[in-house]
């Protein structure tokens, strides 16, 4: 199986898992929000956001490092898993203590504190599962991770309906997250024992030291990225209250469904790009360019469609009670588009051993995001937080492109022309949806996508390499073989 087919195989598995997982998540989020209301859903969202900020301490970047190193040298996989399990158990205990101390010092009511306790268990179990996922990714056996993703969402889906039937409060809903992550951890242990090797606990202090030394840039990046993604919910809760958190997170979680695309491609592409950095810089450059182009092709219609149909989506899925979430969705969708575009830059830097640069960019982004949130939330509430998110994403993307340009990854005239063609096709989609509105939002979305696809074809926003890749995916020989 060639590398293109391997990437597509893994991407297909992850796409299936994420599609099922996010569809289930989409529905249990809707039912949770409708049942709990803005206030209760705000407590749930705050608890998950609060522990996520501390959750990075339970990993310290070692999972990402394990993917890169084991992908390059499979013989070290046992040593990595055995030692990192011990390291993660120690880090998890410290994380639990820090979370408990912090939430009690902040003076929140008992209902919120209980929700945070359950969320802390969820984040610890998830962190332990991540080291098993690292092994699966390094061996390019994403089907096992895919089943774990589906299992997690299935337990949550069923658990939410049980929680509604049993009239659980917000903390009870969060306990379902802890249960699901525990089930997935057990599944990962079984799969690792069955398909790879039985996990064991091993302590090698010199190995701990070397791993932490090498992984700290990943850890720092993870801390800053996590702060960037979750600090807004925490600050909204502190400044405006949990109801505003609920309105904000309805929009935020809707967009998380779409972020499945760059997430799954990142997981599938990262091991391959890491290998290309060692074996073929030309292949690495091509992988980056194509990754960037395809993410842009997918991101532009997302931004256009959600902006124009945000009100319809909110009213359809959450009802008039969450109509205040519309403007947040219209703004936040452009942060998602920027994430699509910048994903290729981040993977290029990480696979090229430039994780320290990512750390610096994410540190600056996190700091800017905090400053922007503190400046905007007191006056504009969750709308201000939405604006802060978009501005921060734009800054991070711009810095990333500046860095890789200095590294020699300068876009050609043809690539820049292709970018212009993609945005022109997106403009055609917007005009169609504005001037030819249909009563059915699904038909309108489909029509807009058809116009967009037709625009890409008419403008020839592709090249011979794209055709070659498509034929290779389909298993057909090409002139370039």
Image (cartoon, rainbow, N blue to C red):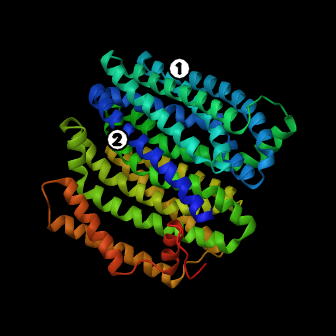
Secondary structure of the residue carrying tag 2 is helix
Secondary structure of the residue carrying tag 1 is helix
- In the picture as drawn, the residue positioned furthest to the bottom comes out as 413
- 430 displayed left or right of 248: left
- 29 displayed left or right of 13: left
Question: Label 2, on which residue?
Answer: 248
Using the image, determine if residue 79 lies above or below residue 278.
above
Circles 2 and 1 in contact, beta carbons < 8 Å: no
Which sits earlier in the primary sequence, circle 2 or circle 1? 1
Alpha-carbon span between mark 2 and mark 1: 25 Å
Using the image, determine if residue 70 lies above or below residue 462.
above
- List x then y, in percent, for residue 309: 23, 54
Which label lies toward us, 2 or 1? 2
Q: Residue at x 77, y 34 (%)?
A: 82
The quarter holding residue 153 reads top left
- 44 displayed left or right of 139: left
- List x then y, in percent, for residue 207: 84, 40
Observer-nearest residue: 386 or 303?
303
Using the image, determine if residue 408 lies above or below residue 67.
below
Does residue 365 appear anywhere in the picture? Answer: yes
Q: Quadrant of the C terminus?
A: bottom right
Q: Residue at x 33, y 26 (%)?
A: 40
Observer-nearest residue: 157 or 87?
157
Q: Quadrant of the N terminus?
A: bottom right
Observer-nearest residue: 19 or 90?
19
């Amino acid at each position: 199986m060639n590398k293109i087919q391997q990437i597509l195989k893994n991407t297909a598995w992850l796409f299936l898992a994420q599609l099922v997982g996010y569809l289930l998540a989409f529905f249990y989020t809707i039912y949770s929000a409708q049942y709990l209301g803005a206030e209760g859903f705000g407590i749930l969202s705050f608890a998950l956001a609060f522990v996520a900020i501390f959750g990075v301490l339970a990993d310290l970047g070692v999972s990402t490092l394990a993917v890169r190193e084991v992908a390059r040298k499979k013989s070290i996989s046992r040593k990595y898993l055995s030692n990192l399990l011990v390291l993660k158990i120690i880090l998890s205990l410290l994380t639990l203590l820090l979370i408990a101390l912090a939430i009690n010092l902040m003076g929140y009511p008992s209902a919120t504190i209980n929700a945070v306790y359950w969320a802390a268990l969820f984040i610890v179990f998830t962190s332990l599962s991540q080291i098993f996922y690292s092994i699966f990714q390094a061996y390019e056996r994403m089907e096992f991770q895919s089943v774990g993703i589906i299992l997690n969402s299935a337990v949550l889906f069923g658990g939410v309906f049980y929680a509604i039937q049993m009239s659980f409060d917000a903390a009870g809903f969060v306990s379902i997250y802890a249960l699901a992550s525990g089930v997935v951890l057990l599944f990962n242990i079984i799969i690792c024992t069955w398909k790879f090797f039985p996990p064991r606990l091993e302590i090698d202090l010199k190995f701990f030291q070397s791993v932490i030394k090498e992984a700290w840039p990943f850890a720092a990046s993870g801390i800053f990225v996590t702060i960037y993604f979750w600090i807004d919910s925490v600050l909204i809760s502190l400044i405006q209250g949990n109801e505003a958190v609920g309105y904000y997170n309805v929009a935020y979680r809707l967009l998380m469904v779409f972020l499945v695309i760059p997430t799954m491609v990142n997981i599938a592409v990262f091991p391959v790009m890491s290998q290309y950095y060692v074996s073929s810089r030309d292949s690495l450059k091509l992988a980056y360019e194509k990754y960037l182009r395809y993410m842009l092709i997918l991101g532009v219609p997302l931004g256009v469609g959600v902006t124009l149909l945000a009100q319809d989506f909110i009213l359809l899925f959450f009802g008039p009670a969450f109509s205040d979430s519309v403007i947040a969705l219209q703004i936040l969708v452009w942060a998602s588009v920027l994430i699509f575009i910048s994903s290729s830059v981040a993977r290029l830097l990480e696979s090229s051993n430039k994780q320290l640069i990512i750390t610096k960019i994410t540190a600056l982004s996190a700091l800017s995001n905090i400053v922007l949130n503190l400046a905007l939330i007191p006056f504009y509430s969750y709308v201000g937080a939405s604006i802060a998110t978009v501005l921060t994403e734009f800054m991070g993307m711009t810095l990333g492109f500046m860095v890789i340009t200095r590294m020699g990854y300068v876009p050609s005239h043809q690539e820049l022309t292709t970018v212009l063609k993609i945005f022109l096709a997106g403009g055609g989609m917007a005009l169609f949806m504005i001037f030819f509105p249909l009563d059915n939002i699904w038909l309108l979305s489909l029509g807009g996508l058809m116009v967009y696809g037709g625009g890409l074809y008419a403008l020839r926003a592709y090249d011979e390499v794209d055709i070659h890749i498509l034929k290779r995916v389909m298993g057909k020989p090409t002139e370039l073989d």
